[in-house]
Amino acid sequence: MCVPRGRVMLKISGEALQGPAGYGVDPAILSGIARDVAAAVAAGVQVAVVVGGGNFFRGVGRWPGLDRASADYVGMLATVMNAVCLQSALEAEGVPTRVQTAIEMREIAEPYIRRRAMRHLERGRVVIFGAGTGNPFFTTDTAAALRAAEIGAGAFLKATKVDGVYDCDPAHHAGATLHRSLTFQEVLHASLAVMDGTAITLCKENDIPVVVFNLTTPGTMLQALLGDWSVGTVIS
Ligand code: UDP
């Protein structure tokens, strides 16, 4: 399925950035992402990005004694570290990039201002949204869905480490079947492990198709960015 190029929301999990080290940011992976985004921007696609923070910290993985809200704030700060690294990688590829954070930290990034974000995108700048939604008890998938709706993105491109959505976990079941397309209702009804229900519901209610694809397969992310959604699973 090929769709017209426009404005897209690219969601990259923190885990996808960590590479074989299992922690932090792998420079080669970051550069690969930056090259693909640069090529898409050169082709006229307006790219907004949300990066997760799981490669550094996750609220749900906290230790006893650290309350959930505090842990989630640390998780949100982790997303800002990734956002700043990705900005630098994109600028090394010659792509003007702005980071906007949901929690103000003006020395590092702009605060999130919807209209300003849209203006940046119109001018060919990549906008990376950091610090999630700014609220604990949410995920960066939800932040990406929320921002996608706010900026009028035509698609939510979810980069993962698998080829799309399977009927069961491909890591544990050799015969797992890849779905090529699903409805939002099917994902919600079967509680398929695509992303959390809040994020899926936001995309459903705002008619934003979700494309789940494999970030580690060379060329796939660029294809998805350019509107070739046959690379993974389309949820609409
Ligand atoms: N987080 C949060 N509110 C948000 C987005 C993120 O509290 O709106 C926190 C939460 O603790 C989460 C962490 O930031 O575990 C990192 O985000 P996420 O787990 O979504 O990252 P990913 O799995 O994509 O790497």
Image: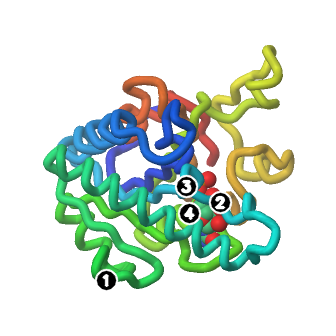
Q: Which residue is mark 4?
A: 145
Q: Nearer the viewer, mark 1 or mark 4?
A: 1
- Alpha carbons under labels 3 and 1: distance apart: 22 Å
Point out the frontmost of discs 3 and 1: 3
Residue at the image point whose x is 32% and y is 68% from the top: 99
* Residue positioned 74% across, 25% down in the render: 171
Which disc, if any, is residue 56?
A: 3
**213 and 59: which one is in front?**
59
Q: Under tag 2, what secondary structure?
A: loop
Residue type (three-letter) at the residue carrying disc 1: Arg
Q: Amino acid at mark 3?
A: Phe
Question: Mark 2 or mark 4: which is in front?
Answer: 2
Q: Is mark 2 within 8 Å of ligand 1?
A: yes
In front of the other: 162 or 131: 131
Compare marks 3 and 1 and give the one earlier in the sequence.
3
Q: Which residue is mark 2?
A: 58
Q: Earlier in the sequence, mark 1 or mark 4?
A: 1
Q: Is residue 134 visible?
A: yes
In space, the residues marked 1 and 4 are separated at their CA atoms by 24 Å
Task: Confirm if mark 3 falls within 8 A of ligand 1.
Answer: no
Callouts 2 and 4 close, C-beta under 8 Å:
no
Q: Earlier in the sequence, mark 2 or mark 4?
A: 2
